[in-house]
Image (cartoon, grey):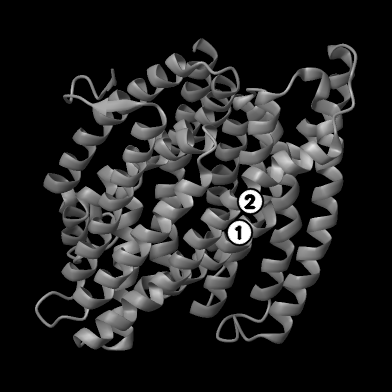
Amino acid sequence: MKQLFRGILLLTVAAFLGECLEFLINMIIARQLGEEGLGHYMSILPIIFFIVIIASLELPVSLSKLIAESEKSYHKSTLRYTTRWTIILTGIFVTIGWLIFTVLPFFSSYHPMVRWLMVLLIPIVAFSSLSRGYFMGIGKMGKIAFSNFLRKGAQLFLLVTVFRLYEFSSESALFVALCVLIASEMMVFFYLLHAYLFQWKRIDGHGHQKEANQQEIGKALLSVSLPTTFLRVFHAIAHAIQPFLIKAALIHYGMSTIQATEQFGLLTGVAMTIGFFPAFIAHSLLVALIPAVSEASAKDNEEKIIKMLKGVLWGTFAYSVPVVLAYYYLGEALTSMFFPGSEAALYLQLLWPYFLIHFFILPLQAFLIGLGLVKDALYHTVWSTVISYSLLYLLGAQTDLGMRGIIIGMNTGGMLLLMLHLYTLKMKLNLKFGSIWLPFRRST
């Protein structure tokens, strides 16, 4: 538990600093691109996240789970096989990405070099994910924490430097912002690759190395990677569709295309940027809990899992409730740092249930993954998204609701996802709900 707490603390501190930088990054991007440009930037980000998910094949999750469950003597053969697998898949994905972005007009309305940035991102993400998975599995959370901070620090430094030195048109400014994003990912790639190669040379010093069964390694990786990738792919597709769905609902509501784009930019680029600021704690819990829960599950240590679950629920409640109260009462002051007098303050206040719920959802997903319930997490996400998006469009297009209807749909989907996660964990661990002070008690 001490190692878990230390890892969570490292990740949380680094993530907090990274989120502070992210806040400044989004402020710079918002001011440089304007409301419409910010809307376009936020519309491209889901596509970038989709590429990241496909290229990584969720290796940080599957490899960390496999490494945490196996003996140290099997680590080198596991990594050797996983590296070969990563090289082959990266070559395939780069070829497919090159063909798709060359033939299909995905980015025809943007700078012509944007599509090549997307192709370059594939190998960067793939090999960074391999390194992340290994360091997560052996509990080297300091390297993960530093790499996360490095990405944000490099992005902020490059944005400030480039936009102070040069003036750009709206189209070129959007392209420059994307170039900076890819450049920061490349810096993280070089850092993790160097650390990974150094650690590779030290593995032989940990005693006799054994050859793991390649078929078993492949099966173990795929059993986690495939459903987790499907989960993330569905999530990414849903987020890629979301901008168009929200804008379509707002246009049906009566807004012009430009107004709908601006309102979407305020919702995602301002309200959700502020709202998800404390999510660095939930993400830190997610990263640290997957190998910890996996190891405890492999040893059939159910009591330890339940103890971790109670601690996570208590900890999340302690920080999330004050945060959403601040959003509700200080919404206007917070959003004025981006665009003074905008409707983003109202959106932030109405979305407080959505943020509160997601602070719980992320660590609960770590328990589902660690317990081998990835498929359940996938099914939960599919059902909650279908219901959320249906309500989002139907209510958002209503003449008396508009953006309020969209927010109702988002809050409803989040609540459904949380309840499904909790119910599945309750059944898996033979628990029953107790009071708020005793979140769970063992069933008799």
Question: Amino acid type of disc 2?
Answer: Ser
Residue 85 in the image: x percent, y percent? 82, 49
Residue 2 in the image: x percent, y percent? 50, 11
Across the whole image, how many numbered discs are drawn on residues? 2
Residue 233 in the image: x percent, y percent? 55, 60
Question: Amino acid type of disc 1?
Answer: Val
> Which residue is label 2 attached to?
184
* Residue found at the very far front of the displayed protein: 444
Image vertical order of residue 36 relative to residue 227, above or below: below
Image vertical order of residue 389 relative to residue 54, above or below: below
Give the residue drawn at x 66%, y 85%.
Answer: 104
Snapshot quadrant of residue 204: top right
- Quarter holding the C terminus is top left
Left/right placement of residue 344 relative to residue 280 reads left
Left/right placement of residue 189 relative to residue 207 reads left
Residue 260 versus residue 209: which sits nearer the camera? 209
Can residue 165 be spotted in the picture? Answer: no
> Which residue is label 1 attached to?
180
Residue 434 versus residue 265: which sits nearer the camera? 434
Instruction: Give the structural element (helix, strand or loop) at label 1.
Output: helix
Residue 64 versus residue 202: which sits nearer the camera? 64
Left/right placement of residue 194 relative to residue 9 reads right
Instruction: Give the structural element (helix, strand or loop) at label 2.
Output: helix
Give the residue drawn at x 20%, y 49%.
Answer: 352
Residue 306 in the image: x percent, y percent? 39, 20
Give the residue drawn at x 80%, y 35%.
Answer: 194
Give the residue drawn at x 71%, y 78%.
Answer: 100
Image vertical order of residue 306 relative to residue 426, above or below: above
* Residue found at the very far left of the displayed protein: 400
Compute the Cα span from label 2 to label 1.
6 Å
Q: Are the residues flagged by discs 2 and 1 in contact, CB closer than 8 Å?
A: yes
